[in-house]
């Protein structure tokens, strides 16, 4: 299981990490970065989510569907 961790650094910034847990123990941590502003933190969280999502397999292949089209 992967999750995004936000924490305060010694310098007062907010750090963002991607952590991976196995059997309730953190086994891997990827440091994404640190930021001072809300927009900077939001950017880092989006980047962290992309790291998590790249390991996931989509439930549906949306390339098989016509965009905006209807059957019939």
Image (cartoon, grey):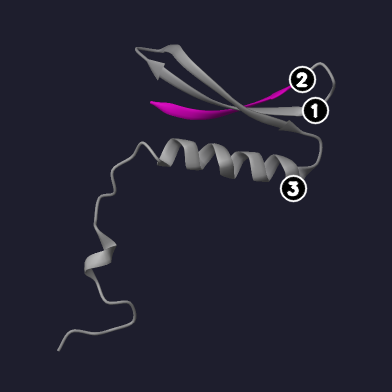
Q: Which residues are magenta?
A: 1-8
Circle nearer the N terminus (3, 1): 1
Q: Residue 42, percent across and down?
A: 67, 44
For mark 1, what is the residue? 13
Few, some or many C-alpha atoms within 10 Å of disc 2 (few <14, some 14-19, many ≥20)?
few
Give the Cα separation between the discs numbered 3 and 1. 13 Å
* Above or below, 65 relative to 22: below
Give the Cα separation between the discs numbered 1 and 2. 5 Å
Give the Cα separation between the discs numbered 3 and 2. 17 Å
Residue found 46% across the figure and 13% down from its top = 26
* Above or below, 42 relative to 60: above
- What label does residue 39 carry, if any? 3
Q: Quadrant of the N terminus?
A: top left
For mark 2, what is the residue? 9
Residue found 41% across the figure and 41% down from its top = 53
Query: Quick check: is 7 in the magenta stretch?
Result: yes
Q: Is residue 2 left or right of residue 10?
A: left
């Amino acid at each position: 299981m992967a999750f995004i961790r936000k924490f305060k650094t010694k310098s007062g910034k907010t750090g963002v990490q991607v952590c991976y847990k196995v059997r309730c123990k953190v086994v891997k941590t990827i440091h994404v970065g640190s930021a001072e502003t809300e927009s900077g933190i939001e950017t880092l969280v989006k980047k962290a989510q992309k790291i998590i999502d790249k390991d996931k397999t989509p439930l549906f292949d949306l390339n098989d569907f016509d965009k905006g089209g209807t059957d019939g």
